Amino acid sequence: MAIDCKNSGAREDFPKDGPKPNYPEERSGWKGYVEWEKYPEKKADAAKVLANYKFPGPPEFQLQQVPLTNPLLEGVRWKQYHYAMGNTLTDQPDISWKYVQEEKSADMNHVLQFPYNGEPPRERLVETSLTNNKDHFVRNHGGIPEIERDAYYLEIDGLVNEPKNLTLADLQNEKLFPRQSNVVSLQCSGTRRIEQINEYPGDGDELINAPWGEGAIGTAKWTGVSLKKIIKHCGGLKDGGKGIHLEFYGADTYFKKGNVMNYVVSVPWRKVKLNEVLVAWEMNGEPLPRIHGFPLRTVVFGYIGARSCKWLYRIKAIKGPSQAPVQKKEYLYYTPQVGKQNAMYSNGFSIMEMPVSSAIMTPVTKEQIVHDGTISLTGWAYSGGGHWPERVEVSGDGGSVWYQVPDENLSKKYYHAWRTWTFDCPVDAEGWLEFCVRTWDNALNTQPTYVRSAWNFDLHVTSSCHRIKIYSINRSKPATAARLKQLEEKGLDILPITRPLEFDLESDEHYAEAMEAMGGRDPEE
Amino acid sequence: MAIDCKNSGAREDFPKDGPKPNYPEERSGWKGYVEWEKYPEKKADAAKVLANYKFPGPPEFQLQQVPLTNPLLEGVRWKQYHYAMGNTLTDQPDISWKYVQEEKSADMNHVLQFPYNGEPPRERLVETSLTNNKDHFVRNHGGIPEIERDAYYLEIDGLVNEPKNLTLADLQNEKLFPRQSNVVSLQCSGTRRIEQINEYPGDGDELINAPWGEGAIGTAKWTGVSLKKIIKHCGGLKDGGKGIHLEFYGADTYFKKGNVMNYVVSVPWRKVKLNEVLVAWEMNGEPLPRIHGFPLRTVVFGYIGARSCKWLYRIKAIKGPSQAPVQKKEYLYYTPQVGKQNAMYSNGFSIMEMPVSSAIMTPVTKEQIVHDGTISLTGWAYSGGGHWPERVEVSGDGGSVWYQVPDENLSKKYYHAWRTWTFDCPVDAEGWLEFCVRTWDNALNTQPTYVRSAWNFDLHVTSSCHRIKIYSINRSKPATAARLKQLEEKGLDILPITRPLEFDLESDEHYAEAMEAMGGRDPEE
């Protein structure tokens, strides 16, 4: 069951009586871009417009049930925020959805329609170690600005010695900047969030805490310029850069607790100095798709994806981390006793580097598998912050006995990318089995054991051992082979196991013999 | 969202071309009763009628999602079985539903509309240690025959020395039979099945394996005659009763793998001899409600509810357990490696006596509770086979630390009934907590730890420690008290926790102070 993009609430009810919005496009050739950060009075005015509406709350999919639709969730409120802003932003939900159709695979799992969040089908994600652009997950925070290549320029300002504007042509001029390409995995901190939701409901959040599966991770060869070189080109940082963050501004519009803003985040100069922050215009040898940030974005290696800012229009050097809400008030990691009753911004820590994690991508949970003593699995393993997966282990019994995935079954090592893997696991037992995977990175970090081990109220970073339930039907067992043969002879299937067997489980004669052998149902007097 | 009884598939499509059913009422004053067991040729004919239809499979609520409707499930196929049988049985789904309206509380949780399966609201079930008749769970296997009191008689035959027919007046004649009353809990082996389903899907079964909660148990004072006395009245059993079972025949119609039959089960003479099988016409001082078996049923103490046969019309003494499908082919308990691929009737054991089990009835899972350091719980504890709950223990941390429920918080002990309990549990921690309960009976039996510890393919007897997740908001914690005060001042509620807090979690000033105190987000160079 699909949700139609048009069914997005009462668009015709916007704008309302009261303050009339008028936020025209800032720059010619930058469609869908409103500059908020330079105009505090415009922000104040937009907040008044928002206050004029009663927007719907997040859908109650955590305490009740995650829907089985695609898209799973629509994002009605976020669409209405954009309608309320009028002219430049009203069409953003439709434009965004149009680019989903044009730039992403038709069979994406649309986790949230707007702002668009989507991940590819599980099995396909790990077929290649570089993710096809059409399959790379998308976690957008707003609409998709349509910026013309030739109209584009990047501002660099703040605590740099020589603030500059640079066009794409400047950045691509190899006489000014050496070109850099890296294979880098980006991962949303929401990857595998569905496991946390299924165990315990958490913060609904204003921008829905989307119920991601295991596919909010992807790997590409990104090409651009190291941000370090751009800073050098701007004469370096004031005070030698000590304690400085580089703040990234995205041309999309974001909303937080009644306020309107651009998407703004930051990373420390210390990270930039390692040539681990790329200002990129290419993804796997192609220009960035619009949905991935055309014409320019940052790619921050080994960090939460949220720092890799799309539709990047400004980089500002500042003292300490950004005070913008995405940085200061979101992507915080709480201890399990913190929640709506006591959460602050300062009692969660800010998620930057991503920890070691992994997932089984095939089979998928609740699959019922007929096999001959071996079940094949595929998956991915990743560790952020320049670490790499050194060892992947699979268990077929919930984490008691572990098998090492042979090194030759793992894809190539990179400092900043995942490794995909395959494994043929010996399976004797029948019935429901719990498979799980854990990864050890080169620093001997491994994963928490259970979802509860690392559950947190904002449902970020599900790094616990990934567990799936599969039903084993082992044809090497005589009773099972006999049953399968019976089914085949009658042209019936054993799947799904929840359909009762159409014929008698046992003949009366066999039953009588078995009862005789066990001395009947009742004991002797 | 309620399911209308009328939406029960294409009733007008029945009967079809092909063999025409004609199964008139057997006896005047016995509406809805067809005698099958005495007429093998009628059974064969009815099987041909059934074979003429393609009935729908069970709804796929196990691999997908249990619906949030009431009734949860409709039972379309079972209704259609009855439509297919024509005249006497066609109206049974409507008649059955009519008695639900008349005889049960309006707020029952209808787990399956037809055959009717329903349980009362959790909190009410444990308010009294004797269950109000309107609230007593119902697990029917077919429609409700409407038998007139004066037309009724009970046949006793088989291996008794003097087969007899007895009217209700005979049975109630205290010169013939001493009257016996006992407080007895009846429990469906499906109690708490939802927990097994939620962990692992199992057999869909022909008669849907209903997703019961914790309410498929109830306690009443039953009045009637001990079956032992009736057997004596019939001159006793042949051969002194050695190895004999008493087979009970119900006037409802049952279906199994394309065959049509009456509901037939048996219990051993050894059990009857203990005066633990009652032939009852009263439930809590009132005549049996029709939905509970009017005018006469068996009540088998400490056994699975399925042996307590409703609308009892015949008792036959036989050698060994009944070979009827309900006894031989259902209510079997399998080891977890047995399933659709290898299940037989002989490799499961027959569920008779019920084990020790218990449940927390309030709070319910996913509740979010504001408290001052203590959370109050209510529940029930039961053990079958003449055992009684000796000790109830509650844990607030998933089963590490256990608190004993004080004896004075448990209801009165009976040999064959549950004990209800209440407990005020000290709770310091905040966030999601796992509460669980376990009971020890007088024979020192206690419950398996996890659902997986005792999961079985037919999803019977969920006797593992009952676990609920509750979200603790402890007002005795200063940060929580402050947040609750803020909410109160703004006229807002903290519930549900999945709704984001409407205002900022923290002032900019407080955040700045906290950051200063922790030396900022980033470490020193």
Image (cartoon, coloured by chain):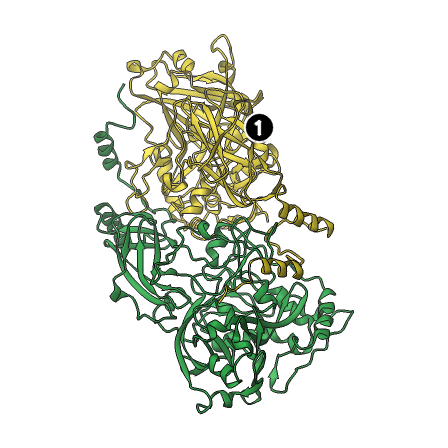
Chain colours: A green, B yellow
Residue B476, x across and y down, in percent: 62, 41
B236 versus B325 height, above or below: above
In the image: residue A522, left or right of residue A356: left
Residue B287 figure quarter: top right
Q: Chain of mark 1?
A: B
Query: Does the image show residue A310?
Result: no
Residue A438, placed above or below residue A417: above
Tell me the residue that label 1 is attached to.
B133
Give residue B139's position: percent from left, percent from top: 48, 35
Can see residue B119? yes
Relative height, residue A248 to residue B26 (above, below):
below
Give the amino acid type for the residue marked by disc 1 in the picture. Answer: Asn
Question: Along the line of sight, which residue is nearer the eye, A426 or A454?
Answer: A454
* Residue A465 position in % (x across, y down): 39, 55
Estimate the x, y position of residue A112 in percent, counting from the top left.
54, 65
Q: Residue at left 51%, top 52%?
A: A335
Helix, strand or loop at mark 1 = helix
